[in-house]
Image (spheres, grey):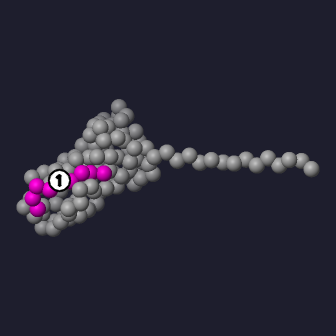
Amino acid sequence: MGKQIVKQRYAWWFIFVITPWAVKSAVSIDNGLAHCVTIKPQQLVVEPLPILSLSVEHQQLIAQCGCRSMLAKYSSRLPLKKSNIQLMSGQFIIDEQPIIKLPIATSARLIGDATSENIDTIKITISCAM
């Protein structure tokens, strides 16, 4: 009787994380609620789905910034040298949570290498939803 050789396959999953110091250069935030809420990028996890963690510091209620609810809207876009790519948009609640996590693209392949020379920064725009 012969020996059977069993081959094992190993799947290695790596989560690509852009560290806080690199996030500040890879992500730019246009905060339309800056008089009420300070929002800063903290961490960008790219794989399997690009998720941006933001720190949130409240100065006053967002109603005092003209919002009619606690809902804010955001959009993400990728400015390339010759055009802009709209990545994703949505709404989120601004309450007392110090960290908010937002999906910024439907696929890691859309943003590619956020440190590439072809990409300036990922632009995030935040404003009142209503």
Residue 57 covered by magenta stretch: yes
Residue 95 screen position, x and y as percent: 20, 63
> What type of secondary structure mainly makes up the magenta span?
strand
Residue 75 screen position, x and y as percent: 26, 54
Which residue is found at the position 31% from the left and 41% from the top?
Answer: 20
| SS of the residue under disc 1 | strand
Q: Which residues are magenta?
A: 53-61
Q: Quadrant of the C terminus?
A: bottom left
Viewer-closest of 2 and 90: 2
Callout 1 environment at 10 Å: few (<14), some (14 to 19), or many (20+)?
some
In this rendering, the answer to whether 108 lies above or below 81 is: below
Q: Extreme right residue here?
A: 1
Which of the 4 quarters of the picture holds residue 82? top left
In this rendering, the answer to whether 3 lies above or below 129 is: above
In this rendering, the answer to whether 96 lies above or below 44 is: below
Visible residue check, residue 47: yes
The number of discs equals: 1
Which of the 4 quarters of the picture holds residue 78? top left
Residue 77 screen position, x and y as percent: 29, 48
Q: What amino acid is at disc 1?
A: Glu
Which residue is found at the position 86% from the left and 47% from the top?
Answer: 3
Residue 128 screen position, x and y as percent: 16, 60
Residue matched to label 1: 57
Left/right of residue 113 with respect to residue 67 in the rendered view: right
